[in-house]
Image (tube, rainbow, N blue to C red):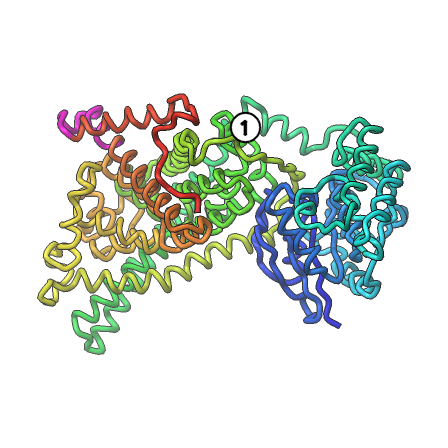
Amino acid sequence: MKINIALAGNPNSGKTTMFNALTGSAQYVGNWPGVTVEKKEGTVKGDKDTNIIDLPGIYSLSPYTLEEVVSRDYLLTEKPDVIIDMVDASNIERNLYLTTQVLELGIPVVIALNMIDVVRKRGDVIDIKKLEKRLGCKVVETSALKGIGLKELIEECKKAADIKESKPVHNFNSDVEAALSEIESSVSSLQDNPNARWFAIKLLEQDIKVMETFQYGPGEKEKVDIIRERLEKAHDDDGESIITNERYLFIGDVVSDTVKKKHVGMTTSDKIDRIVTNRFLALPIFAAVMFLVYYVSISTIGTWGTDWVNDVLFGEIVPDNLNAFLEGIGTSEMVQSLIVDGIVGGVGAVLGFLPQIIVLFLCLSILEDIGYMARIAFIMDRIFRKFGLSGKSFIPILIGTGCSVPGIIGTRTIENDKDRRMTIIVTSFMPCSAKIPIIALITAAFFDGKFWVAPLAYFTAILGIIVSGIILKKTSLFAGDPAPFVMELPQYHAPSPKNVIRHTYDRAKAFVVKAGTIILAATVVIWFLMSFTPSFEYISFEDDSSGSLLGIIGSAIAPLFAPLGFGKWEPTVATFTGLIAKEQLVSTLSVITGGAADLDPDAVSEAGDLLSTFGGMLTALGGFSFLIFNLFNTPCFAAIGAIRREMDSPKWTFFAIAYQLVFSYAVSLVIFQIGSLILGQATFGLWSVIAIIVAICMLFLLFRSYNPGKDKFKPAIANN
């Protein structure tokens, strides 16, 4: 018999880890709410008849957030055979609030008492038999991380599926129970309804979603209102608060009866958080941690690997042997150039940065797995709220450090439409894996590999997000109170090697796949445009390429970027090809310059080398301006497609792209023009005046007081 098992639970209860362990899937695991923004489905390993549906992490079945709506709608309409309720055993009191609601749905429930290894390590004891009796369902001790109790959990689910229906055994205060019974008997549609108690509770709470669709018989609504008002008067509280209080009273009684803690007071995680999330120390610690991550990834260990790949593998071994082979079989100069200079040079330039990508995401995966990334979200919420922004917006931004696409999709967890749209617009500002090669290239080409450039790019991105958020919040399109952000900080724990390696592997694999597909195809096109004139005369790489198709196109567009410090056709063309995939920017420059990216500045000697050739095109300030423009510029086509899907409006998509273009151009213009004046690299002129005016306008938009009734900066966009 085929059964469907719904996996429900609080954020950070180990739900997605459990889904991966049961199905063998590799869904993303993160220590923040909203990672699972849609239900995901998989089959239990070795058992094709048992399906697992991973629902978004939620704290309750009340319709306050998108995650709660998705989970509740699935449980009520799809009616799975069994619900696995993931309960964090190390924080059982908090997790049982959702349990009391799930038990009222009338669907068989099996509780996975997860993270039992943490409980045992603390020396705490949970009386499982007594807990099962109090809750009226089977409880299985599990650890998704360590693979404890997984087989037993599925076996109990199969047994529970045969029951078909269950009834909660927990009771509230006598007058509350009397009111619920009276509601059930007063509403005809609740009689003989397996979900009668659940609906009665929701009617008493005046649940918005239920009230919108519930069908009363004649005079029944008035009867329910009288019952509710009588109870509210007796308790001097509203119906929802009465039920919430009753749940916590029941949970407190259950916990005191079944859980014996060895140590009472602050946990080790609490003690660490007193330092890590301290009001004054949190930001310096965060800055130091991210500085160290980028230092290890871009300036030391990651660079050692990248130098070998570029200098030895794609600098000597592959091209030398390939050239010898092609010459040996009599290949023409044009075909040889296509293969060696075009494909190997272009794709190799991107793959050369793979060691840095691996080291970076290995570090980030460890931070995520131990629980520190959740603290970053908490820290940034404190900062964001000072500027009228929501910390909930920072969750997709953090996810976007891997790839902008899942970060943009992750905005679905933000229930406030204005905050969600604003977050979609700025999420791609973060340095994703595709932008790491650009940062590494600029660092080596213009700053002699200085260790501070990569962290500066990271924090500049965060600053750009904050500035954009403040500016956008002061327009009527985005004004309003920030979306509420509630999250539970997970306990610190040692990282799981399996999770860290799998997470790093997935991101590295995605990088390689893109290099072998999208970038490969684009590189061939770039080589063709570089190798032929408008009359289709072949040009070798030793000749002047400015007369090629690519050179002519780039030269026509380049003046647009001259005020930004990179008005040459080579970086102009590279910037535009970066729309295909941001890594393509480096690949394009490699094809144009005819050399790999040796990231050791001291080793640069050949005139055809990417680093020396590109580094000689621009000043250091122009190179930094180039970096900032491509950091904030419109993202790749895949991310633009995600923006279009999530905005669900051509006008909003156009607004997002237009804002990204204008913001990136304005910031780069101010940096280069004013920076050139300060450094004495330019004389005062027209573009200096324009840059100062732009800077003043940005400061005005940033610091102006906002009156929603007198907003002069409202773009003409319909809310469709």
Does 10 sit above or below residue 692? Answer: below
What span is in magenta?
A: 671-686
Residue at 37 percent of width and 42 percent of height: 717
Q: For the view shown, which residue lies furthest in the front direction?
A: 218
Name the amino acid, label 1.
Arg
Residue at 40 percent of width and 33 percent of height: 472
Which of these two is toward me, 443 or 380? Answer: 380
Residue under label 1: 382
Q: How many marks?
A: 1
Per the image, label 1 sits on a secondary structure element best described as helix
Q: In this view, does 478 lie to the left or right of 275?
A: left
Q: In this view, does 238 lie to the left or right of 591?
A: right
Q: Is residue 442 left or right of residue 68?
A: left
Which of these two is toward me, 714 or 449? Answer: 714
Dot 1 alpha-carbon crowd within 10 angstroms: few under 14, some 14 to 19, many 20 or more: some
**Quarter that holds the N terminus:** bottom right
Coordinates of residue 718 in the picture (x, y in percent): 40, 43
The image quadrant that residue 62 belongs to is top right
Coordinates of residue 521 in the picture (x, y in percent): 31, 65
Q: For the view shown, which residue lies furthest in the bottom direction?
A: 329
Which of these two is toward me, 140 or 33? Answer: 33
Q: Can residue 12 be seen from the camera position used here? A: no
Does 514 sit above or below residue 232? Answer: below
Q: Is residue 681 magenta?
A: yes
